[in-house]
Amino acid sequence: FLNSTNTGEWTTYLEQAGLAELNTRNILLALGSMPIIAIVLNVISQLLPADPSKPPLVFHWLPFVGSAVQYGMDPLTFFAENQRKFGNVFTFVLFGRKVTVCLGPQGNNFVLGGKSTVFNAEDAYQHLTAPIFGDDVVYAIPNEKFMEQKKFVKWALNTDAFRSYAGLIEHEATEFLNHDSNYKAYQSGKTDEWGTVDALEMLAELTILTAARTLQGKEIRSRMDKTFAHTLSDLDGGFVPINFLFRNLPLPHNWRRDAAHKKISQFYVDIIKRRRENRRDDEAEYDIVNALRDQKYRGGDPVTDSEVGHMLIALLMAGQHTSMSTGSWTLLHIAADPELGEKLFAEQVQHFRRPDGTWNPITYDETKDLPLLDAVIRETLRIHPPIHSILRHVRDNVPVPQSLSAPSENGTYVIPKGYYVLASPAMSQTDATVWDRPFEFDYTRWTDNTGFAAQALNEYTDESGEKIDFGFGAVSKGTNSPYQPFGAGRHRCIGEQFAYLQLSTIISKFLQELELRMDTPVPRNNYQTMIATPDSPRMIRYRRRTPAN
Ligand code: HEM
């Protein structure tokens, strides 16, 4: 009504009401000043004495937005600054949500070792993941059912499967080097010609190609054309931090995400249906599709076609950003340190090179016996874990254990129901009380053990080797460890071994074929992508190795 043309009537009404001064201009002024009032009230509320049973709150000027900008730009600096002020437990506001950060190995233990009925992952992640994966898998369903789905997938990721995957991954990497337009300098056959590639973009493509060929099977890989790649990229566009909080904001990336989800689901369901109807897998090797399709839930229910399709989407997506980021960081560190590159090359020669200079096939068993490459990947994951924050929604008031935080004036802190808790393996992996020179990339700490503050590490290492089965097979407890790039507890990653195989094989092939260099320093972490990635510039120079060097 502020735009009403009938201002005379409106003014008369105000006069009658004794509010003659309150004209449109003043109303606009009043509305305009509301944000200022909200900011002032927000600041005052933080200056008033706080409830001592709640963890301390990080000061923020803007209501609702809270500390989203500082956290989003550089979460680790944000955590470190507040850890200095408050210790290991503090709360910040993230777009209207209260998030209690629990740092250090004890913080990891508290959050990742918590019961799912109290610290719940579904509530925290489903806005983000359900529209991408589907409404009948992962975080869109009760935890017990998801744990069964994890078991099905884990079963399909077995040693026999890995043995067959090594050759497939090597084949995709070789084809990539031989045909991708970024590798013209390699394809020319000359050994004195340097080319350049963007480390992250290259790994993005290789990760999806190798994961598709292995985790999706031959038939699906062969049907993945450019249109499929575009659809997948639209689906992937739904992985943006804001979708953690709001599932369906009317934004183009969400519309594209939803259309892509429909298309990809249908693509999988059609394949599965055809295989069911034919009752023969004449086009397919026995692949993960069959393996998932043949599973049954504990109560005897079969896995539906839609669930198989959606699990396949989830598998592809869960490994994509994490593996591509890790692979690109690993190559960047190798390119930045030619001496390391030569040592790694020597390891390849020792394991795979034939006397005539050609290479033996890369096998799963041999990838597990490359200690130097293993140490480099481990160190990469220590210093650049792709997942820097692990979130859970708090379903019940939870007291903070004293081992994590000193008691407040009124006893221990209690994290209220409705909050979120956050653990950050990235923080514990660079904790100076555990690691010597925590921010230095030093792969030798994994080969000679001198880079740990050894005593501190032993304190946290689970000597008992305690194993727990959360429904997807026994895993070591590990929630106490300061090194958790793959998480721990109930939600622990089941893709670790696959990721190691994928990364070791791709990087081995690159080491065998290419010398790598970099003209710029190793880039900084870019935290604005949801999974931390190397910032630009991240160009790697390469040249073809001569058969004899
Ligand atoms: C869970 C990291 C690759 C599938 C996780 C979690 C982390 C993680 C930190 C725990 C999340 C949480 O507790 O909220 C990584 C890293 C990878 C990688 C660093 C590569 C370097 C993969 C791959 C797959 C995969 C290749 C699939 C083949 C999963 C699944 C979960 C998971 C199914 C379980 C989620 C849950 O139970 O809530 N991953 N991951 N990951 N990851 Fe991975």
Image (cartoon, rainbow, N blue to C red):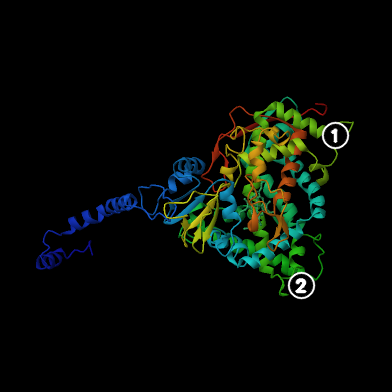
Looking at the rendered image, the quarter that the N terminus falls into is: bottom left
Q: For the residue marked with disc 2, what is the amino acid?
A: Glu
Q: Is residue 177 above or below residue 109?
A: above
Q: For the residue marked with disc 1, what is the amino acid?
A: Arg
Say whether residue 226 is visible. no
Q: Which mark is residue 8?
A: none
For marks 2 and 1, the one nearer the N-term is 2
Disc 1 target residue: 353
> Which quadrant of the view contains residue 510?
top right
Disc 2 target residue: 277
Q: Which residue occupies 47% across, 40% down?
A: 84
The answer to whether 14 appears left or right of 376 in the picture is: left
Between 146 and 237, the residue placed more toward the observer is 146
The answer to whether 220 appears left or right of 393 in the picture is: right
Circle 2 SS class: helix
Between 233 and 308, the residue placed more toward the observer is 308
